[in-house]
Image (cartoon, helix red, strand yellow):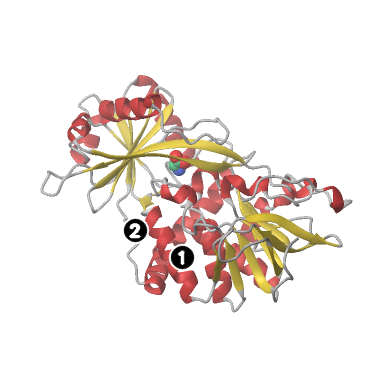
Amino acid sequence: MPRTPSEATDVLVVGGGIIGLVTAWRSAQRGLSVAVVDPAPGGGAAQVAAGMLAAVTELHYGEQTLLGLNVASARRYPQFAAELSEASGQDLGYRACGTLAVALDADDRAHLRELHALQQKSGLESEWLSGRDCRRLEPMLAPGVRGGLRVDGDHQIDPRRLASALVTACERAGVTFHRRWAERLHVVRDRACGVVLSGDGGSAPGAALLAADQIVLAAGSHSGRLAGVPDEVVPPVRPVKGQVLRLTVPPGYAPFLSRTVRAVVRGSHLYLVPRVNGELVVGATSEELGWDTTVTAGGVYELLRDAHELVPGITELPLTETCAGLRPGSPDNAPLLGPTALPGLLLATGHHRNGVLLTPVTGDVMAQVLATGELPEEAAAFTPGRFCGRVPGDLSDASLEQPV
Ligand code: GLY
């Protein structure tokens, strides 16, 4: 049985990845008492992600609504990064370096031309370059590059630093961390009013109940797995596996790439993100394989093969890390932000490929709705109700699932 509830906090965030942390930080800045439940805050998909802030180069057909939110968040990044850096005393690796998207063959070039047309129709800034001009900008590119798009507004940040800075900023803003698993949502008379924590078998044995006025489910791809959430409001998120490599450009080595370079190679998206400290991130696979996070020979091979086609010199660099993470995919690739049909329960999840990019706007949107009850207009198209709008009925039959 859970121990007696402690005094209720205003906001309890389930999930201490970058989305949960930014929600907690921004809410605490508004004077709310906030707690975060996560066994390892700052972990999750941000430990794998490359950190591209690619509102323009990652535009896809059918995602024009999401584009508005992506662009709004990208615009906030310089100010957000400066503020978070100040609040945490940490450098976030924010780099306004721009992006070059290139084509290696006629099919890739046709694809890129389509993307360029869509970008122009959407009022976005991007410039078509010949293969020669691409190589003038990035001399390490393969001689066969057939053309490309220069997008000076798509930047990058180091997601590991971002996560670490958010943990520190939260601590400094008075956010309480419960380094435990959330076992189940506590619902009383059709209202979410707390979370039962798992016992840790050590200094805090036995399950404990944390009471809160509002609970935010921000557990990334695991957001649909918290027990006790009524079926009607379970977020429809699924894990989408991404394998990523990290290489190192040794000190003193000739400059390798000066900006993010990306391409679609045989239908697969590939990107190379160069950091100031010499790290070169190469990503990413996109695999619908459930909860599997195995790094496979095939995944690493395909990334290296495609990266080598794009930038032949890459094979000389030390391969320093391989890893895999899970994007929280949603049915329309856009996030779920704001209140659910269950009073007291809100969502901040489903950010799929855009979690890092959408961090600033998610923090602002969630803090506003938590502090005032009003969801900002910019989030109106992203409410959970577009997927799970039914008012919950009998809550007593909510099923038990995995801890989150
Ligand atoms: N936004 C890059 C990725 O999801 O792979």
As drawn, the residue found furthest toward the bottom would be 31
**Residue at x-position 52% and y-position 76%:** 174
Q: Does 324 sit above or below residue 265? A: below
Front residue of this view, candidates 65 and 331: 331
In terms of image quarters, where does ligand 1 lie? Answer: top left
Q: How many neighbours does mark 1 have within 10 angstroms: few (below 14), some (14-19), or many (20 or more)?
A: many
Residue kind at label 1, given as amino acid type: Val
The residue to which callout 2 is attached is: 94
| Tag in front: 2 or 1 | 1
Residue 238 falls left or right of residue 60: right
CA–CA distance in space, label 2 to label 1: 17 Å
The residue to which callout 1 is attached is: 167
Q: Does 293 sit above or below residue 335? A: above
Q: Position of residue 268 (x, y in %)?
A: 42, 28
Q: Earlier in the sequence, mark 2 or mark 1?
A: 2
Find residue 177 and name its label: none
Contact flag, marks 2 and 1 (Cβ < 8 Å): no
**Residue at x-position 74% and y-position 46%:** 400
Q: Is residue 381 visible?
A: yes
Q: Is residue 374 visible?
A: no
Residue kind at label 2, given as amino acid type: Tyr
**What is the quadrant of residue 209 in the picture?**
bottom right
Q: Position of residue 260 (x, y in %)?
A: 31, 44
Residue 370 falls left or right of residue 178: right
Residue 186 falls left or right of residue 361: right
Q: Secondary structure at mark 1?
A: helix
Front residue of this view, candidates 169 and 29: 169
Location of the N terminus (image quadrant) = bottom right
Q: Position of residue 198 (x, y in %)?
A: 64, 57
Front residue of this view, candidates 240 and 185: 185
